Image (tube, rainbow, N blue to C red):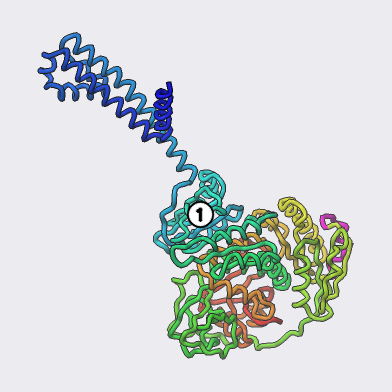
Amino acid sequence: MKRRDRLRYWFDSTMDRGTPALIGWLALASVVLIAVTATLVVLFTDTDTERNGGWPGVAWMSLLRALDPGTMGSDTGTPVFLGLMLLVTVGGIFIVSALIGVLTTGLDHRIQQLRKGRSRLLERGHTVVLGWSEQIFTVVEELVEANQSERRSCVAVLADRDKVDMEEQIRMRVPDTGRTKVICRSGNPLKQDDLELVSPDTAKSVMVLPAFGPDSDTTVIKILLVLNNRPWAKARPPVVAAVQNSGNLAAARLAAGPSGLVIDADDLAVRLVVQSHRQTGLSTVWNELLSFYGNEFYIHRAPTLTGTTYGDALNRYQLGIPVGLHRGDGRILVNPPMDTVIAADDRVVVVAEDDALIKLAHSAPPVVEPAVVEPSRRPPKPGRTLLVGWNARAAKVIELLDRFALPGSVLDVASPARPAALGDIATVNLTVGHKPCEPTGRQPLEDLGPGGYQHIIVLSDDATDPEHADNRTLVTLLHLRDIEVGLGDPYSIVSEMNHDNNREVAQVTKADDFIVSTKLVSLLLTQLSEDVNVYALISALFDPEGAEIYLKPAADYLRPGARATFATAIEAARRRGETAIGYRLGRDRDVPPSYGIHLNPPKATPLTLHEHDQLVVLAGQE
């Protein structure tokens, strides 16, 4: 009894080994069936044995009949021989049927395993994206655009979701991936074994995608720790990530290690809100510069410009516009003094459509001197700003506004109740007040007297669901814009939105700027995954003490209605110590997707700007 139990246990154990073990048992059963049948034929049918070539011939006949029952139809011989051939044929039917079932089950199991995305990726020079959120589609779309000039590229996504579901969603949202192959793997980025599925050792860069949820920063920090503690086969590729809460930035950078780059999404949103409220249309400029569609920043080596001043280099490019210098010691100077000499180890920061399109000119394009307006300075005046709503970023917004504001400027906060943190904010240039208001009500907004303000900022409510918060923001914007129409266009409106699709819906409000921080962070992370040097440039542009992007009246540079060229606009800005990178047509300011913004236009093409048009320039703080 014990021996039978042990034999049964051994048999069950071999069966548990899967499809190969089952095929082995079926093969053994086939061999036994054929051998026994051939032996019986030899023992009981001498004539039939001799006629069919002895034991080897009978064994071959048995094999054919086991595999194909129809072969038996042509058999002749004694009843014993025919009976044995019938036996092997019937036995073959059972064995072959079982084999087909085993192969079908095994193949289906293998397909299911592949659908689970648990096979290891064998790629080199690919971009690894860890995590999943709504922004994955923006990231994939941007990487596809960035890799258009490559013969072959790959994006590997690792997330704790179903592989097939991820790939179907990406195909639906990004139907054309061109030469870029998008591969998804199911796994937890917090587990070392799962990380190996996307071959991070051979990747070009690794991006930790924030989920923009309550525990997003915790997850990002843990993934960075796993990556930092992982034994790398060679030099670790650049790792880029973002945190929502500025308070978690130091911990995230410590977790990322020296070769990791972590950006502060909260700080980026605050700086863009503040800069946009002063320069309407700025968010559209940043969306293009951070996107791989249109123009973006490139760090270009131009040895022929060695010894040339930065000012002289502005019109030395046929395609592309210089905006700064990347020094040999790693420093980036944005809009440096025009007499700055370009050294041999310097590289030029250029705004261009593609690095392959950056081209030096043989000679500088002509400047239409009669169209140039002589430099003059308008004395700035203290401003009045209305901040509608309150969220976790509001205090930082006020503090940064204070750094930009002129003494005597006024900021009023409109919210249902006075925020407790408002009394803790110390300001130097701003006089901060509070006005009770329900932002979604028309009459409460009219009672604020919005016509007495030059700028209005509408903040998204982070105490409620993002979709609901965007709906409330949309209602507020509609009221403010309708009030403005009645007053005669006295103020600009800058608003925060949580989702980019809601921004598209909210365009009907004709607000001057929509700040979608989640999309901007995704665009920036994608840029950094291609070139980490861009981070120093972006940081310099968002530094209140450095050069910034401004949209200034074109009439300050070119005579309204005068026939000129963009090279003439570049020269007019250069005489003011500024760098012109584009213009905005006032008649198209409400027309998507560019809203009248034209960056890096042809330098020699005729250009006529009017009173309501603007020039996009890089300049020092006003």
Please tell me whether mark 1 sits on a helix, a strand or a loop: helix
Task: Please state, as top left, top right, bottom left or bottom right, where the C terminus lies in the image.
Answer: bottom right
Residue marked by disc 1: 195
Task: Say which of 384 and 220 sits in front.
Answer: 220
| Rendered location of residue 77, percent (x, y) | 15, 12
Identified at 54% across, 62% down, the residue is 229
Identified at 48% across, 61% down, the residue is 231
Within the image, what quadrant is residue 334 found in? Answer: bottom right
Predominant SS of the magenta segment:
helix
Asked if residue 333 is positioned above or below residue 251 in the image, the reply reads below
Within the image, what quadrant is residue 378 found in? Answer: bottom right
Task: Say which of 239 and 225 sits in front.
Answer: 225
Identified at 69% across, 78% down, the residue is 544
User: In the drawing, does residue 356 fall left or right of residue 278?
Assistant: left
Asked if residue 581 is positioned above or below residue 389 in the image, the reply reads below
Circle 1: is it few (<14), some (14-19), or many (20+) Cα within 10 Å? Answer: many
| Rendered location of residue 351, percent (x, y) | 53, 74
Question: Which three-letter amino acid code belongs to the residue tagged 1?
Answer: Leu
Task: Say which of 44 and 301 sits in front.
Answer: 44
The residues colored magenta run 439-452
Count of all numbered marks drawn on residues in the image: 1
Residue 193 visible in image? yes
